[in-house]
Amino acid sequence: MQSFHPQRRLLMGPGPSDVHQRVLDAMARPTLGHLDPDFQGLMEEIKGGLKALFQTENRMTYPVSAPGSAGMETCFVNLVEEGDKVVVVKNGVFGERMRQNVLRAGGVAVMVEFEWGSAPDVDVVAETLAANPDARILAFVHAETSTGVCADAAELCALAKKHGCLTIVDAVTSLGGIPVRVDEWGVDAIYSGSQKCLSCTPGLSPVSFSEAALEKIRNRKSIVRSWFLDLTLVMDYWEGDGGRSYHHTAPVNALYGLHESLVMLFEEGLQAAFERHRMAHDMLVGGLSDMGLDMFVDEAVRLPQLNAVAVPEGVDEAGVRTRMLKDHGVEIGAGLGPLAGKIWRIGLMGNSARPECVERCLGALSASLAAGHNS
Ligand SMILES: *Cc1c(COP(=O)(O)O)cnc(C)c1O
């Protein structure tokens, strides 16, 4: 075997996004023991940074030692008990994954489905909640990465409260790219990922839980069906005032990376980061329009950080992506499920949400489309 030296690509798909050299450098620093006092200080800083990012005072805010899917599973496996009814909003890939999580936790999923590419209709969700007065939880995706649609999280959370439900919110693609206001909205459980708008490497999942969520977990009649993700155990590791107890070995160097990406985000300022994502989006949409390409999602519900572009009639969707990667070193994403072959997904997440990245992506797309016409 030989050492692996990957080429540098510009990552502009649905994640992972472009990782800043400062984050990579941070990860190359000396590994500490995971119970070393210096490392514990770093853990505290990460928790504080994540609280600011989630805009919450929730004590139980920390990064799960695994990718976004594990954060998703942490929320469901802790909050859903045998027989619990969960209303799940689905308008893309990740709503379906939520359903799978409910079933595995022993719950009953009541689905409210919307067309891929459209936003959840709050009135329809309200009808479903009214028709299911025994529902305990409402689960929805804030930023649906498979389509580039933003859900009205404030409205959906308010609705859940009105119907006596807790909320589980997928903020994997939203966190760091658009505002996520956990306390103001009244979110009870939320999960994200390190590799989207935080521009860190994949493999960590920030989560946060409200007091009401913790109360439901404390009152469980049965034990949590996952040992690794059981919050009551993990928290002794991440909280443990006056000495942490061993639960698992934290991915020490990965956490250096997350810490550095948070440092960079707060140096820039959250508001400035949101504005940068918005400006990159406007620039991309303008450039696509100049090329005669149409956006797939209505302007009112578009995410700035995930852009679904309609593939023109007769264009070889996969061929264009392959040329962009091979000839230009730029990665963009394909459509999933019913949108396979119909859209490209261009991510403007974190470090990829910069004018020079947008320019390079537009140039690569334009050249790859032209090369397709000539071949
Ligand atoms: C990427 C993503 C996930 C899964 O995260 P992984 O880190 O790939 O496990 C979940 N939900 C949404 C909306 C995502 O975009």
Image (cartoon, helix red, strand yellow):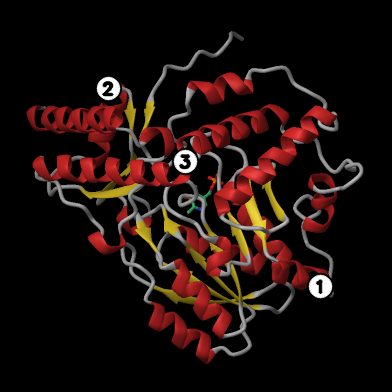
**Coordinates of residue 54 in the picture (x, y in percent):** 57, 53
Amino acid type at image mark 3: Gly
The residue that mark 1 highlights is 220
Q: CA distance from mark 2 to mark 3?
A: 32 Å
Task: Name the one closer to the observer, 354 or 346.
Answer: 354
**Coordinates of residue 127 in the picture (x, y in percent):** 45, 88
Quarter where residue 81 is shown: bottom right
Amino acid type at image mark 1: Arg
**Coordinates of residue 155 in the picture (x, y in percent):** 45, 74
Q: Earlier in the sequence, mark 2 or mark 1?
A: 1
Quadrant in the picture for the C terminus: top left
- Left/right of residue 322 with respect to residue 260 in the rendered view: left
Q: CA distance from mark 2 to mark 1?
A: 53 Å
User: Tag 3, which secondary structure?
Assistant: loop
**Nearest-to-viewer mark from 2 and 3:** 3
Q: Earlier in the sequence, mark 3 or mark 1?
A: 1
- Left/right of residue 370 with respect to residue 53 in the rendered view: left
The residue that mark 3 highlights is 269
User: Tag 2, which secondary structure?
Assistant: helix
Q: Is residue 71 visible?
A: yes
At x 74% / y 41%, what residue is drawn? 44
User: Are discs 2 and 1 less than 8 Å apart at CB?
Assistant: no
At x 49% / y 21%, what residue is drawn? 21
The residue that mark 2 highlights is 328
Amino acid type at image mark 2: His
